[in-house]
Image: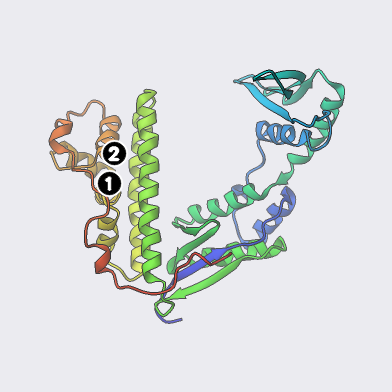
Amino acid sequence: MNNLFGVIIFSNEVRPQPLSRVVAAAAHAGINPDWVRGIRPKNAFIRAVRQLKKEGAITDRADGILAHKYQDDQQVVRFQFSQTYLRGFGVEYDKAAVISFMKEEQSIVCDNEKVLEVAQRLYATVQHQYNCTDIQNLVKRVIEKNDAKRIPLRDGVYFLPVSKQHVAEQVKKFFEHLDCTFFVMPVNSASGEKTNLIKAAVDDMRASVLSMQAEVKELKTENKLTPAIAKARLALLHKELKQYREISAALQEDAETLFQAAGTAGKSLSQTQDGVEGLIASVQGGDGCTELVYDLVEAAEPELKLPLRESVLLPETDVEAGVANNVEQHGAALVDIGS
């Protein structure tokens, strides 16, 4: 197909599958079996607890039942099932059962024999079951392991650049082995989708950087932003810079146009173009940078003397005026795909 931008991928049909079948499907599609992670014991227990009510292990009343997790530490995860009812103007709880998972022993303890029996059966089942979220996370992992950036267009619908089309075909083969439908739709310059794809890429760029910004702020507040974490986040920014350049090349658009359209988020990415060490040297030399970049460089090299924050911080910007008007306009929106 001439002037191929890439492919749009989505599935309307994702069903829970036995873990053994997922492993077989991955092998059939040429996916590294190590990427098919087993269900962690703690997560299997929590899933079993969520299903207990459905199994009728605890008598329900018209006003409902709660499963409240009130302890989760290195030794144990503990839930209390409580029937909730109204008395006067407040809500009170009638204790029904306490169920615990001992992490070291990987065993379930409960003061209600019926609940314990059903919980153990459910736990044994869900340990070997991939739910819909597990399968979607595996697909995401396959894409990431192939150093690809998927651009969300709507819930469950993504764009991959033409250079990663082979990854989409691999995932399709995986789904076909599970007897599930997976769509790979080529998109080219004649499809009228260029503007929509560019907008989606810019939105994704902003969302990705804003998510990291919120994470870094929380880590700083909790005094958990270590040099190792800071360097890893700087490396991730540099990796995403290369991935967004790959996206812009696929869309036959100047990468700087996308970064300008993303405002401050685009600047945070652009500043990593010389790699982590180059960025650190740049900030140390007094070059302007975003607040996110300054925070990460400061945490990555705590012994390094940096210029005063106020002297190097670039002004916060959103979409720069006129950038969108420089992009050639095209037609139909992508919002109906996969619906």
| Mark 1 touches mark 2? (CB < 8 Å) | yes
Q: Is residue 161 above or below residue 214?
A: below
Residue at figure coordinates x 33%, y 41% from the top left: 234
Residue 209 shown left or right of residue 124 in the figure: left
Q: CA distance from mark 1 to mark 2?
A: 7 Å
Residue ranking furthest to the front:
88
Category of crowding for the residue at label 1, using alpha-carbon neighbours closer than 10 angstroms: few (below 14), some (14–19), many (at least 20) = many
Q: Amino acid at mark 2?
A: Leu
Residue at figure coordinates x 23%, y 25% from the top left: 303
Residue marked by disc 1: 268
Residue at figure coordinates x 62%, y 48% from the top left: 133
* SS at mark 2 in the image: helix
Q: Quadrant of residue 326?
A: bottom left
Residue 226, horizontal then vertical, whole percent: 36, 28
Q: Which numbered circle lies on residue 292?
A: 2
Q: Nearer the viewer, residue 319 or 255?
A: 319
Q: Quadrant of residue 278?
A: top left
Residue 26 shown left or right of residue 297 in the figure: right
Q: Amino acid at mark 1?
A: Ser
Residue 115, horizontal then vertical, whole percent: 82, 26
Placement of the C terminus among the 4 image quadrants? bottom right
Q: Quadrant of residue 5?
A: bottom left
Residue 205, horizontal then vertical, whole percent: 36, 52
Q: Is residue 159 above or below residue 61?
A: below
Residue 308 shown left or right of residue 176 in the figure: left
Label whose residue precedes the other's in the sequence (1 or 2)? 1
Q: Is residue 322 above or below residue 330?
A: above
